[in-house]
Image (cartoon, grey):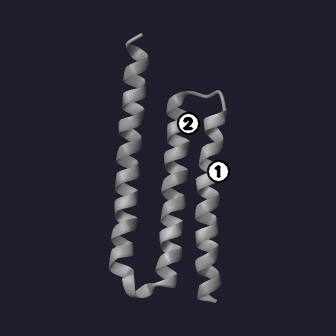
Amino acid sequence: MIEILSYCCIVVGIIFWFWGTLPLIGTRSVVFKLHSLSVADTLGSIAIVVGLLLKIPSEWSLLLLAIITLAIWNTVLGYVLAYCSIDGENDD
């Protein structure tokens, strides 16, 4: 049962990765596109790591560190990219 749940988490994570790329095709602002991409990428990556955590529970400390790092890094990177894109638009 845990094996099936693990694979489900990994598949959901991959779906989030692809779902996050769909707004890049649209005509909305760069900030909206970056926000959609970073949120979907963060959730997808965390879901994949949770799936790995279910498969390899002996490595819980490293995988928990990966989840925390993903949450912090992707959030900060999204803010930095959004700030840079807004700053670049105001210079014109």
Residue 36, x across and y down, in percent: 55, 43
The numbered mark at residue 19 is 1
In the image: residue 12, left or right of residue 88: right
Q: Is residue 59 above or below residue 87?
A: below
Three-letter residue code for mark 2 = Lys
Q: Is residue 50 above or below residue 83?
A: below
Label 2: how many Cα within 10 Å (few below 14, some 14–19, many 20+): some
* Image quadrant where one finds the N terminus: bottom right
Residue 79, x across and y down, in percent: 38, 39
Residue 80, x across and y down, in percent: 35, 37
Label 1: how many Cα within 10 Å (few below 14, some 14–19, many 20+): some
* Image quadrant where one finds the C terminus: top left
Residue 7, x across and y down, in percent: 62, 76
Which residue in the protein does label 2 denote? 33
Q: Is residue 66 above or below residue 40?
A: below
The tag earlier along the polypeptide, 2 or 1, is: 1
In the image: residue 77, left or right of residue 33: left
Taking the spot 66% from the left edge, 43% from the top edge, the residue there is 22
In the image: residue 59, left or right of residue 23: left
Hey, which residue is sitting farthest top in the picture?
Answer: 92
The numbered mark at residue 10 is none
Q: Is residue 55 above or below residue 77?
A: below
Query: Who is closer to the viewer here, 15 or 32?
Result: 15
Is label 2 in a helix, a strand or a loop? helix
The CA span between labels 2 and 1 is 12 Å
Is label 1 in a helix, a strand or a loop? helix
Three-letter residue code for mark 1 = Trp
Taking the spot 39% from the left edge, 20% from the top edge, the residue there is 88
Q: Are marks 2 and 1 in contact (CB under 8 Å)?
A: no
Taking the spot 54% from the left edge, 45% from the top edge, the residue there is 37
